[in-house]
Structures are given as structure tokens and as C-alpha cells.
Image (cartoon, grey):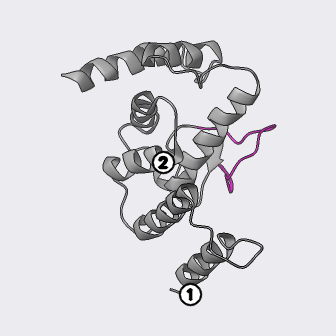
């Protein structure tokens, strides 16, 4: 309870302008709503519906493909890497980019909560955008899958066909 109160006070302090007056911008409202949502679900069991909402809050590009990636990488949320490492995307601990990972587990990045895994995925997408990859330009899901294949997102050479297979099953 103290932690929640501390986080709420911290968020309130962060939205006060240097003049001391509250700056009630749409972005600040969104950030406060996001933080309140994350706090409210922190102790709930994982569900794909919660994941979809967190993906939306983080502004992750190509959310449909990313959701399929989470299903594939975790064996529909049953893998050891997910259950013990809180890693939804099979992400490795990065050498060069920023991360919110707390360490490693079985050769993969480990997170304090699965929400952190989603936040890290967004950091990963943003990092690729800064490196010149044009994934932020609106395109279809096939474009994003080609990107994942180009950068060798997964070690499995059949990763993209597996995603396509999942996508086709998801459509029916």
C-alpha cells in the first residue's frame, strides 16, 4: 500500500510545473491513466486481455503481430521463460540498447513483472527506429514480419512461417 501511495505522489509531483501549478495536458492525463492501470493490474494473474491493453498503452507498433509473437514465444503463456522470467517475447538481455530487464534467466532477459517485458519490447522497437529502420511508417502486418525476418528476431528459421500460421488460425 505504501508503494502505491508513493507512486501516486511521485506521479502528482511530476505533473506540477516549475511555477507550482498543475499542468493538465492530454499527455499527462494519459500517463496518469496508464500508471493507475498498471498499478491496478500488478497483482492480477496474467491474461491476454490485460496484455492487449498494456500493448495499447505502450503504443507498440503492429500490435496484432506482437500479440502473436507473445503466443509463439511463450507457448501460449505456458513456458518456463514466461512463468519464471516474466518474459513474453523471448528477448535476450541487450548488450547495446537501454532495457528495463532486471537480469537474466535461462539465457533470456528477466523482468520483475510481465508488464516490464512489454515496456522493454517498446524500447526495442524505438531503438530500431533510431537505427534507421522505418517501422514507424504505417504499413501492414506483412511488412513488420519481413522486418522481423530481416533482423533475425528469432533463432528459429521457421519463425515467420509459424507467425503466419498462427495469424491464419487467429482469423478463423
Q: Earlier in the sequence, mark 2 or mark 1?
A: 1
140 relative to 129 in the view: left or right: left
Does residue 104 show up magenta in the picture?
yes
For label 2, count other residues whose C-alpha is less than 10 Å away and answer few (under 14), some (14-19) or many (20+). many
For the residues labelled 2 and 1, the Cα–Cα distance comes to: 28 Å
Measuring from the top left, give residue 70's x and y in whole percent: 44, 37
**Residue under numbered circle 1:** 2
Instruction: Give above or below for 63 relative to 86.
Output: above
The quarter holding residue 148 reads: top right
Instruction: Give above or below for 144 relative to 87.
Output: above
Does residue 96 show up magenta in the picture?
yes
Residue 113: assigned label:
none
| Contact (Cβ within 8 Å) of mark 2 with mark 1 | no
**Residue at point 72%, 71% (across, down):** 17
> Closer to us: mark 2 or mark 1?
1
Magenta part of the chain: 91-107
SS of the residue at dot 2? helix
In this view, the residue farthest toward the left is 172
SS of the residue at dot 1? helix
User: Is residue 3 or residue 19 the one in the foreground?
Assistant: 19
Task: State whether residue 80 appears in this view.
Answer: no
User: Is residue 151 or residue 103 the one in the foreground?
Assistant: 151
**Residue at point 37%, 66% (across, down):** 44
Measuring from the top left, give residue 163's x and y in whole percent: 41, 21
**Residue at point 51%, 54% (across, down):** 115
**Residue under numbered circle 2:** 82
The quarter holding residue 169 reads: top left
Instruction: Give above or below for 20 relative to 137.
Output: below
Amino acid at each position: 500500500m505504501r508503494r502505491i501511495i508513493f507512486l501516486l505522489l511521485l506521479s502528482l509531483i511530476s505533473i506540477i510545473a516549475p511555477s507550482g501549478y498543475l499542468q493538465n495536458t492530454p499527455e499527462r492525463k494519459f500517463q496518469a491513466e496508464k500508471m493507475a492501470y498498471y498499478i491496478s493490474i500488478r497483482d492480477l494473474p496474467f491474461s491476454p486481455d490485460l496484455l492487449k491493453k498494456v500493448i495499447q498503452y505502450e503504443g507498440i507498433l503492429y500490435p496484432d503481430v506482437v500479440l502473436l509473437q507473445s503466443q509463439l514465444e511463450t507457448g501460449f503463456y505456458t513456458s518456463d521463460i514466461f512463468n519464471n522470467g516474466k518474459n513474453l517475447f523471448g528477448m535476450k538481455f541487450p548488450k547495446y540498447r537501454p532495457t528495463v530487464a532486471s537480469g537474466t534467466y535461462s539465457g533470456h532477459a528477466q523482468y520483475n513483472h510481465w508488464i516490464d517485458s512489454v515496456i522493454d519490447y517498446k524500447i526495442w522497437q524505438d531503438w530500431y527506429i533510431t537505427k534507421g529502420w522505418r517501422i514507424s511508417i504505417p504499413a501492414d502486418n506483412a511488412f513488420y514480419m519481413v522486418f522481423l525476418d530481416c533482423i533475425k528476431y528469432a533463432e528459429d528459421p521457421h519463425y515467420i512461417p509459424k507467425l503466419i500460421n498462427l495469424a491464419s488460425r487467429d482469423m478463423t
